[in-house]
Structures are given as structure tokens and as C-alpha cells.
Amino acid sequence: MEKIKVIQVKSSIKRIKSQKRTLEALGLRGIGKEVIHDSSPSILGMVKKVEHLVSVVEA
């Protein structure tokens, strides 16, 4: 399965609770933090929900 690297580029301050929880579920806890996930439909859906806060690169 293809891997993607998700990098948080904007803060979660002043965001709605569901977006904050989505970032936590992805494993992101601050600006500049990176995590690597499999490119599954559930992960891609979470990334889509917070696409304005993160950057995605193929790993």
C-alpha cells in the first residue's frame, strides 16, 4: 500500500472541535510535525477534512 507523509502547516487554534480531533487522530500535535500513514480511504478522508491545515507528500 502506498504511503503518504502528512505535515501540519497551520495551527489548530480557533478551529472547530472536529478538526482538532481529526488532527489528533492523524497523530499531529503542532506546526511542523510529520507523520507517515498508509494511503487508505479513511486516512484520505481525514486529510480531506483538514486539508487547509496540512500538507501531503508521497513518502
Image (cartoon, rainbow, N blue to C red):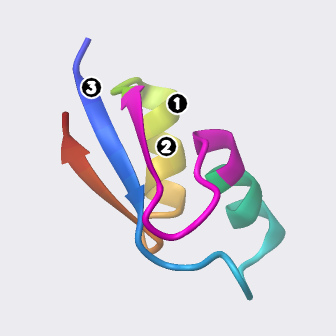
Give the secondary structure at mark 1. helix
Q: Quadrant of the N terminus?
A: top left
Give the secondary structure at mark 2. helix
Q: Which residue is mark 1?
A: 42
Q: Give me the C-alpha separation between circle 2 and circle 3.
A: 15 Å
Asked if residue 5 is positioned above or below residue 47 in the image, the reply reads: above
Residue 51 image position (x, y, % from top left) = 42, 65
Q: What amino acid does circle 2 point to?
A: Gly
Check contact, mark 3 vs mark 1: CB within 8 A: no
Q: Which residue is mark 3?
A: 3
At x 48%, y 78%, the residue is 10
At x 38%, y 56%, the residue is 7
Check contact, mark 2 vs mark 1: CB within 8 A: yes
Q: What amino acid does circle 1 point to?
A: Ser
Q: Which residue is mark 2?
A: 45
At x 49%, y 43%, the residue is 45
